[in-house]
Image (tube, coloured by chain):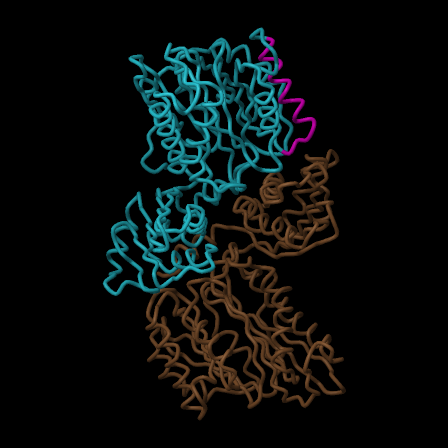
Chain colours: A brown, B cyan
Amino acid sequence: MPVNLVPPRAEDLLPVKGVALGVAEAGVRKANRKDLMVMRLAAGASVAGVFTQNRFCAAPVIVCKQQLAGGKWVRALVVNTGNANAGTGEDGLARSRLACAELARLLGCDGEQVLPFSTGVIMEPLPVERIVAALPRALADCREDNWANAAEAIMTTDTVPKACSRRLELGGKQVSVTGMAKGAGMIHPDMATMLGFVATDAAVSRAALQQMLSQAAARSFNRISVDGDTSTNDSFILIATGAAGTQAIADESHPDYAALAAAVTDVAVWLAQAIIRDGEGATKFITVQVQGGKTEEECGKVAYAIAHSPLVKTAFFASDPNLGRLLCAIGYAGIPDLDVGRVRLYLGDVLVAADGGRNPAYREEDGQRVMQQSEITVRVELARGAAETTVWTCDLSHDYVSINADYRS
Amino acid sequence: MPVNLVPPRAEDLLPVKGVALGVAEAGVRKANRKDLMVMRLAAGASVAGVFTQNRFCAAPVIVCKQQLAGGKWVRALVVNTGNANAGTGEDGLARSRLACAELARLLGCDGEQVLPFSTGVIMEPLPVERIVAALPRALADCREDNWANAAEAIMTTDTVPKACSRRLELGGKQVSVTGMAKGAGMIHPDMATMLGFVATDAAVSRAALQQMLSQAAARSFNRISVDGDTSTNDSFILIATGAAGTQAIADESHPDYAALAAAVTDVAVWLAQAIIRDGEGATKFITVQVQGGKTEEECGKVAYAIAHSPLVKTAFFASDPNLGRLLCAIGYAGIPDLDVGRVRLYLGDVLVAADGGRNPAYREEDGQRVMQQSEITVRVELARGAAETTVWTCDLSHDYVSINADYRS
């Protein structure tokens, strides 16, 4: 059961002019399941992407990066679930390129104008022939008001499709920002492919779009993941079709940049949090705020030490205010000169630790009250500076083990 | 159920001349449970220690370090379970010192000649008055052939007491090396206090003993833990009483040094592996060997990335050869210039991945056969150099979650 996350209603997802989406059942891994999604982009759409840092990055990630670096206009994206096409060597690259070439043939464009994405089990050959066979059906399904179906088609262990929209006005014109994401394993950031696709019908240069994407990623998907600890397939794509007829945003100095960037970030944060809410086996949504650090980096170390500790996470699962485990994580986070006597630890609104130990006024029932909530904020004051950061995580439950022990069966 | 680990028989544990051990039921946390252990050392015994790097290190760790730095002869150790006396501030230090002072009073020595150790829940006040009340009973129980009882008295979530002995001859004299350890949470190295006590009746200078200890720790307890990721209380102590009447080993150049160091390391490795075998919820004992690295450090990064991945560990629990999760962990281990095309991955004797993907000759049933064993070796060849390392870990099971969700209840 995801934590306070309901599936989006189709009518709440705003179409983005110039982006048509279609889905099909390709039978990549299981029959009778939407597992193929195609996005067709209007001519002239800008596309930017950020990708996993994993050295064993998947074949589609390699191909995506090459296509984007090649600089041709992207005309379509092809996304399959059921198989990640990762750890598949040269053969995997050929299969990814074949999917692109086939879609390009149907669209009358070049294979290098199609970006491929895959998610699912690793190290098994991609049954690309099934994808190829289903492409015409996915194309026939393409329409602009199809985001809800598309968000469903990219799910793997997700229990709820994740998509949301924001509307804004730029220069008197209505602009839509709509995005979807998939990913359900977040107890450790290496756990599952994260795919995110956000599109707007505003007009943005590729350079400005890449910057907007990087800023949004830093405040959203990278707050639920650690640099270098990413899965083989993680990809986050931002598309700007320009079909709304707004002024082109060439760079950050454009008066519309900030408003659009804020909307894109807003959508990305919602999606990133949705991934945590639907985390494998999650029963709690946990916000970890670390304040008063010398640098944002050291705040991140403390936040991730807490967010990654299986001991902390099982305590949240048990609704047990085992605060020592939180202190322990702060202590090994890797700040060698941390003065633990100045650290203050809050669970919700309750000050639980100060002066190197338990707050004398702390009562177990206060901690218990906070722990029983489904949304919990842990706040750490380091009292060393003015930097801060926030990350989001979930608890570690029996269902997490069940899901991951049974994933391939 | 621990993995291939049976409790030591009392008769297999060699007494160490000059070390007498006694236990008592102090009722620190639970009634009717041996939770207090005292070790009395003969006058002139050398003692060396290595301790947690955690900034929130526990009160007894701070006191231990101070006493050892003070340079007085150590005459006794006092160990309690049930309460870690960590995250307890100044008050915790006072309680640890009080336990030392009381034992010293009973022994007629100085409080600074007693080393304190605590393990159990964090951030709760140590009920030192119960320890003090039980000290006379523990002292009355002291005898040299009491290692089995002592190993039992330091357990927390351990299901099996952990102790072993080695006998060797130095200069024609029989020498014993006997050790015990406790610690049961090792899926992530921050998880539980690890306490280890190894003693020999050989004669060793304090400087040589510290060196021997550091070498043994590097090959044993530090192979199941990451630098800086240690719990609040981790302590590993090496004692040399000299009561066997051997020549004093002043430094590494002494002809007896190597033989004794090897026996100490042997005992420490056995104990460290025993901790993994009794890991919380463990059903598999996993050896991760990484070879062909440029440095031992980068081999360690890869080994720990595998050993810490919840996805890898749940796959081991499920006996599922989900080899992609292993490749994924290698890929994000943090070697930026790793050529994944040269990496070879073995599961037991089966070559599962090469050339950036699955070995074409690999058959699922071969992987399955290895995964069903209770002892599994994962071997990674990086093909970049001559360095190597080995770490030990266990799988992640439902019982792990149960144990840690229920620990305080």
Looking at the rendered image, the quarter that the C terminus of chain A falls into is bottom left
Horizontal and vertical percent position of residue B305: 45, 51
Horizontal and vertical percent position of residue B93: 66, 25
Q: Splitting the image into 4 quarters, where does residue B255 fall?
A: top left
Q: Splitting the image into 4 quarters, where does residue A266 fall?
A: bottom right
Q: Is residue B409 visible?
A: no
Query: Is B149 rendered above or below residue A309?
Result: above
Per the picture, the main secondary structure of the magenta-coloured stretch is helix
Residue drawn at the location 51% of the way across and 41% of the way down: B227
Q: Is residue B373 left or right of residue B202?
A: left
Answer whether residue B100 is magenta in the image. yes
Horizontal and vertical percent position of residue A228: 51, 59
Q: Nearer the viewer, residue A52 or A401?
A: A52
Query: Is A36 rendered above or below residue A136?
Result: above
Q: Is residue B336 left or right of residue B132?
A: left
Q: Is residue B151 left or right of residue B6?
A: right
Residue drawn at the location 41% of the way across and 10% of the way down: B243
Horizontal and vertical percent position of residue A152: 50, 74
Q: Is residue A161 left or right of residue B297?
A: right
Start and end of the magenta stretch? B87-105
Residue drawn at the location 43% of the way across and 81% of the way down: A24
Q: Nearer the viewer, residue B372 or B306?
A: B306
Furthest residue in direction top, as rendered: B108
Residue drawn at the location 60% of the way across and 19% of the way down: B70
